Image (cartoon, rainbow, N blue to C red):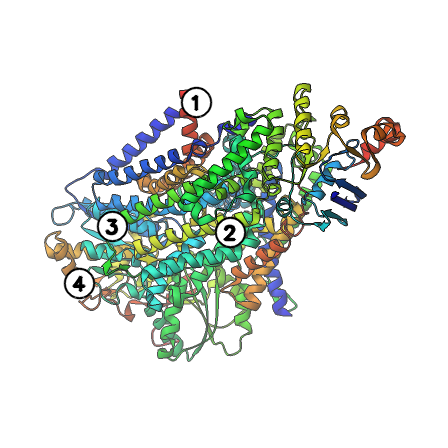
Amino acid sequence: MTILAIERLSIAFGGVRAVDNVSVSIDEGLVFSIIGPNGAGKTTLFNLISGLYVPQDGRVRMRGEDVTGLPPEQLARRGLSRTFQNLQIFFRMTALENVMVGCHRHETVGIFPSLLHLPAVGRQNARTRAAAAGALDRVDLSAAADKPAGNLSFGDLKRLEIARALATEPKVLLLDEPAAGCNAVETGELAGIVRGIADDGITVVLVEHDMRLVMRISDRIHVLANGRTLAEGTAAQVRADPAVIEAYLGVHGSQEAARAVG
Amino acid sequence: MMQKYMKIAAASIFAACLAVGSASAQVKIGAILSVTGPASFLGDPEKKTLEMYVADINAKGGVNGKKLELVVYDDGGKPNEALTFAKRLVDEDKITAMVGGSTTGVTLAIIPIFEEAQIPFISLAGAIQIIQPVRKWVFKTPHTDTMACEKIFADLKRRNLTKVALISGTAAFGKSMRDQCVAVAPKAGITVVHEESYGPGDTDMTPQLTNIKGKAGVQAVINTDFGQGPAIVTRNYQQLGIKLPFYQSHGVASKQYINLAGPAAEGVRLPAAALLVADKLSANDKQKPVVEAYKKTYEQKSGQPVSTFGGHAYDGLMILVEAAKRAGSWDKAKVRDEIEKTKGFVGTGGIVNMSPTDHLGLDLTAFRMLEIKKGDWTLVSDSGS
Amino acid sequence: MAEFVQFLFSGLTVGAVYALVALGFTLIYNASDVINFAQGEFVMLGGMTTVFLGLAGIPLPLAALLAVIFAMAVGLALHRFAIETARGANAVSLIMITIGASIFLRGAAQVFFDKQFHTLPAFFGSEPIRFVGAAILPQSLVVLAGAVVIVVLLWTFIDRTLLGKAVIATAVNRLAARLVGIDTRRIVGFSFAISAAIGAVAGILITPITLTNYDVGTLLALKGFAAAMLGGMGIAAGAVIGGLVLGLLEAFAAGYLSSQYKDAVAFLVILTVLFVMPQGLLGRAKVERV
Amino acid sequence: MLRHTADRIPAVLRRPFVQRLSAIAVIAVIAIVIPAFFPSTYYYRVAALVFVFAIAAIGLNLLMGFAGQVSLGHAGFMGIGAYAVAIGPTHFNIPSWLSFLIGAALSAFVAFIVGRPILRLKGHYLAVATLGFGLLLAIVFVNEARLTGGPDGMLVPRPVLFGWSVRGTETWYWIAAISFVFGAALAANLIDSPTGRALRAIHDSEVAARVLGVDVAKQKLVIFIISAVYASVAGSYLAAFNGHITPDVSGFLRSIELVAMVVLGGIGSIAGSLVGAALLVMLPQVLTFLHDYEQMVLGLVVMGVMIFLRAGIVPSIAAALSRRRA
């Protein structure tokens, strides 16, 4: 069943069509990867899906519901969350507190009980802390729970973002280059984590440059180049597609990539 | 590094405490003045005057066998700060009497403190609310704004002008005087046909004056404000070629106004104390010796042109000192009683005759109507126009 | 018609001053991300120094030149001893430093100059020029012309000289500018000096009209800041337009609506503009890159 | 780089709830003990002023420190609170305590109305919008002289509570001190609550907070309203304590002073707000011996603190102490 459908999505920045008439349909529970050369429009596509940008044309549907142009917090309430390519960590909070923010949409205590620190706040905090600890555990970060986020290593921060997004209990999770900057061991661990998330029934949409990782864990791969769809299929299909090979290796492709913006 | 700064900070706080705590057998006179901030041209000459004359009095041996010690605090024109300093004067400095309060806002704010502490308080601010209703311990030396309005209106009547336009500053003095003028206008048979105002620090009032110029029936224009505003209004007035008689208030009673407004000030009239025309007073004028002496002293020692504002401080200090001499002691209650009995005191602002119902003691004769001619003040005789 | 022209020139003259102060804000902001709340004090220093050098017997043109140089020196000192020492502090701390500097400069002016108001003779006399029924001071035209000259000089400098290009490069991307060998520290210092000079020139030009004292900077900084934001922070053309618009708003509000509430009208318009265009009149919406 | 940022985190933000309240307990004990060393009521007044301004500073600190939003118009809310307790009893026969509540409610309402559009703005644009908002209020207070007495201000009737007339500097010291401790406790409570976490998250990354489902606009509005109420309460106290109020309470310079208190004391530090308020209330008193040089020194102190203790007094000293220990 299709959980996320993107229909003819387009956006241009100053005349450059960063995402141009892209349509993608993603089935529930898959690891769905979006790949493409630098500047192909992958992150822009993510920003459009997650509500940070409003598309100039096209629709985004979640489970059939039109969610085009909804702000990110409302998408989060409908079960869509994401991580960021260049980290967006709450550096002044501990790792656990970072994840606790992810539980925000499930927290029911209002502002006045908070100010007075009524018992309800203590109970809520305990529930949130437990949920957050669970999410940290899923990404193997329990040991770092009480460390200030600023003291964590780069790889840990990548996983912290995943835990934080998981804490929102999403149906669809967008991961923007989770392996960038990670070493081979960390990437290996990451593969397991991502697969595990998908196995729990959460649809994972992955933007990633590490082709080994992509080929290993993806159920389906969508290839973008120059803001447009180039190909889509299983790992094997995509690998064999001449257009994809040209885009990645060909002279033509690299020229295009140099000119693109996104 | 850190430690060094902490030490310096500690040392300066300690030094400050010493400065505060230095007690002596002298009589302390408190003064809270707006030495900085928007009313600094009031507070600055007031402070200089007080310092000059306290030194002078001490050089002559003091009063009642005691030397005076002046404790001046700068409120920056802010009533909240003034209140704290008032508390400090009463509780810490243990002053015997208070001369000061440059602005009406500050004076009204600090009155309760001196009333409660039962300390004679001579204010240097304009508004009539300071002495009306009469408060036991509160006096003031400057003419009220109401008197200035009445003086201007009387002059207008003599010239058979009854319809005026007002242009006022929105800062304390201008607004307060504007309110007084509007209030007493009907009684004086004057109609305010148009009003304009401008903010503190405004640099161009031609739009407001253009409106006044275009208003039919206006026979004269009155500008109530102090500071730089009136000088700019005066220049804009000339720039627009408005020919109507133009009045300023006693708020510009300093040579500085003429310097700033330049040739545009020609023909401008304003009510002010005799001090400004010290040299032009007739030889038998009672005020002549006092104002000439003050003018000379002030201009020599400060190097700045004399203003009536410093004169108010002179009057306040001298009324206090005279009262203390008559009382023969520095007992606060006795000094207060004697201040109230001040009769025939010749000050820079006029001849002061106080009473239990009048803690100002000046009447309209204290104001002279001046006109600026050839860059200098001249007296307008009361009979002519 | 006569009224309209009168208001127009009143607004343009006042607006030109706001524009120059706003330009000073913009230059420093572009080079260093610092909102320099001591910008108004440069205007004060220009006017007051000229006045006092004049009183000391120095011919006014020379006094004016010395005043501009003095203001530049103060600008450089502010950069060297305060901003540079505090490098890496967050934006609010840096703003606080400039506020401290403005308190200090005002305090120093009180002590070393005085607390009186002063004026300078108008450059070409004070006989108003009659123009379609309105009376315009020659000095107003001097202020307007001065503003135009400053803007043109600044534009030429930025557009035509290597140093100017370095200023632009620093504004666009400080790190990249450093990587291509631009001494960004010097560029920032240079921006402070130029801003100070612009402020001082503005101060000298307007003193014959508006008078000056130690305290004139506060209000000018406030209005100049508002003008810079109205036009779009960091955009030179925006600063000029913002300043002129603010001046015109005040003049027309005072003339046609209510002189009591003219400042309120001006700020209401600024608020409304910002609500509709959150980046100011000329600011382009930035796309947040994540 | 990351490590550096972490070092600047005020320690107080990292500690759990109990320890945070213990810091406030220490302040409370100091507030109770310190009057024993006051030689005269003058000291009570200065201390009371410190607490009153500290209340406003905490409010602003919630906005600046936790949500990362600056306001250059917060004195406007002080003005609303101040004029409420002045105008209510004088013109409408409303008892002072009710006027106080009405003032707070009015501030909250005004914050609610202007908050949505204003808080959409970012950084310096937000600064200029709040500045404009504060100026508008100050202009109203100056011009509506029939109600406010204009620039000369108006008398504030002495509050009467259950037949007890609230007067005396010492009484006001205790009212201000207790209110401050209460206000500080509320603010501290907020830090470790769902709202507090959301706000701190917004401060670090608005976009990340949004994709996690935090309604950023709503949270900012909530904290803006709360901080307005803090300022309003402080303004009401100031007016009733002084017995006289002028538009100067809501002026631009007051707003700047409030920001200075927060920044000098330490953004995000509740104790810092108290220290910042103490510094700016007491400096003019301590520096009187400098006479004409007072303003220069005041300017230098502000610059010096920001240059050498750039995270603010309390966080910088706390960091220095913990470094020494480590």
Task: Give the quarter of the image for residue A160.
Answer: top right
Q: Which residue is mark 3?
A: D171
Q: Is residue C74 left or right of residue B303?
A: right
Element carrying mark 4: helix
Q: Amino acid at mark 4?
A: Glu
The label shown at residue B340 is 4
Residue B21 is situated, as x and y percent measured from the top left of the image, at 22, 38
Tell me the distance, in whole angstroms, between the alpha carbons under discs 4 and 1: 66 Å
Image disc number at residue A73? none
Let me know if marks 2 and 4 both belong to one chain: no
Asked whether the beta carbons under mark 3 and mark 4 sit within 8 Å of each other, the answer is no
Q: Nearer the viewer, residue B121 or D61?
A: D61
Q: Which residue is mark 1?
A: D323
Tell me the mark number nearer the camera, choosing from 4 and 1.
1
* Viewer-nearest of discs 2 and 1: 1
Alpha-carbon span between mark 3 and mark 1: 41 Å
Do callouts 3 and 2 mark residues in contact (Cβ within 8 Å)? no
Query: In the rendered image of this protein, does residue D293 appear above or below residue C145?
Result: above
Q: Within 10 angstroms of label 2, few (less than 14), some, or many (20 or more) residues?
A: many
Residue type (three-letter) at the residue carrying disc 1: Arg
Percent across and percent down for residue C259 are 51, 65
Q: Give the quadrant of the C terminus of chain D.
A: top left
* Residue A157 x/y as whole percent: 60, 28
Q: CA distance from mark 3 to mark 2?
A: 34 Å
Q: CA distance from mark 2 to mark 4?
A: 48 Å
Q: Tag 1, which secondary structure?
A: helix
The quadrant in which the N terminus of chain D is found is top right
Whether residue B120 can be seen here:
no
Residue bearing the label numbered 2:
D131
